[in-house]
Amino acid sequence: MRLDKFLCEMNIGSRSQVKSYVKQGLVTVNDVIAKAADVKIDEFHDTVIYKGKPLKYQRYHYYMLNKPQGVVCATQDNVSRTVLELLPKELRKNLFPVGRLDKDTEGLLLLTDDGDLAHRLLSPAKHVDKTYLLQIAAPLSSADCRALETGVDIGEDTLTRPAKVEILGEKNCLLTIHEGKFHQVKRMLKAVGNEVTALKRVSFGGLHLDETLNSGAYRELTDSEVKLLHEK
Ligand code: URA
């Protein structure tokens, strides 16, 4: 791979910016200052250092975002702020949200440029677990819990798949589902005569929302988190 392409893929800057960094002598390849941006490097084995920082090659990028309310899960929107706008411009290239959370839902959202992985995680055949923290209008009866755990009619061809309910308080619970139908959690609670008053996703495909992330903050996934998702 050409050095300038590598630096661009590592989000160091645009093609012209990285060319200028190389010209300024800010990039070394195997401890030798790179003389030209078009030299070929072995992205898997060569050691490329930019401003003293070693760059580990990454074909794809994976971020966990603590989505705040009021932003939409889209790459572009004419009216509302998008989740991508919460990341700096240089990191946004080719990223997209894996699935959707409603505008008023907060919590764990994965952003990536790895289309294959996203496709697999969203495939109905995979039944990836998603856990939501709910605030609800009224307490759930044991009959409501049983119904949610067995399957409820949300107006689709079939009942929802069995879910898991964990009561946390009078008007708080965790709900784990294995599907991702439009407004699914809100529709499930409606089906048992209740109403979701606040919704936060706390886990997705075995990943847990990093509680150190403030609302609107993001971080890169760790290698073990990426591995976990690839094992799904
Ligand atoms: N279910 C919903 O109703 N809304 C979401 O944002 C996610 C799941």
Image (cartoon, rainbow, N blue to C red):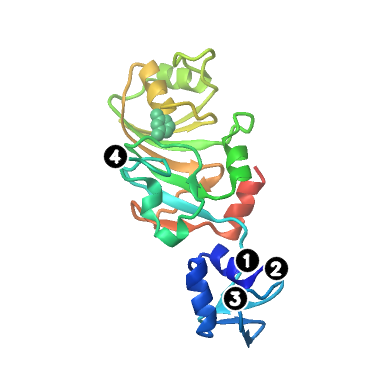
Instruction: Check mark 3 vs ligand 1: CB closer than 8 Å? yes or no.
Output: no
Instruction: Check mark 2 vs ligand 1: CB closer than 8 Å? yes or no.
Output: no
Amino acid identity at mark 3: Ala
CA separation, marks 2 and 3?
18 Å
Q: Which residue does the image show at 60% across and 59% down from the upper left?
A: 223
Residue identifier under label 2: 44
Reading the chain from its start, which is encountered first: label 4 or label 2? 2
Where does the C terminus fall, quadrant-wise? top right
Where does the N terminus fall, quadrant-wise? bottom right
Characterize the local packing of mark 2: few (<14), some (14-19) or many (20 or more) Cα atoms within 10 angstroms: few
Tell me where residue 174 appears, x and y as whole percent. 42, 35
Compared with residue 117, is residue 175 higher up or lower down, i.e. above or below? Answer: above
Tell me where residue 198 appears, x and y as whole percent. 31, 35
Q: Nearer the viewer, mark 4 or mark 2?
A: 4
Characterize the local packing of mark 3: few (<14), some (14-19) or many (20 or more) Cα atoms within 10 angstroms: many
Q: Nearer the viewer, mark 4 or mark 1?
A: 4
Which structural element holds mark 4? Answer: loop
Q: Which mark is residue 57?
A: 1
Tell me where residue 53 appears, x and y as whole percent. 53, 78
Depth order, front residue of 45/153: 45
Residue identifier under label 3: 37
Asked if one can make out residue 167 in the rendered structure from this viewpoint, the answer is no
Characterize the local packing of mark 1: few (<14), some (14-19) or many (20 or more) Cα atoms within 10 angstroms: some
Asked if one can make out residue 31 in the rendered structure from this viewpoint, the answer is yes
Amino acid identity at mark 4: Val
Amino acid identity at mark 2: Phe
Compared with residue 15, is residue 46 higher up or lower down, i.e. above or below? Answer: below
Reading the chain from its start, which is encountered first: label 3 or label 4? 3
Q: Nearer the viewer, mark 2 or mark 3?
A: 3
Compared with residue 107, is residue 40 higher up or lower down, i.e. above or below? Answer: below
Characterize the local packing of mark 4: few (<14), some (14-19) or many (20 or more) Cα atoms within 10 angstroms: few
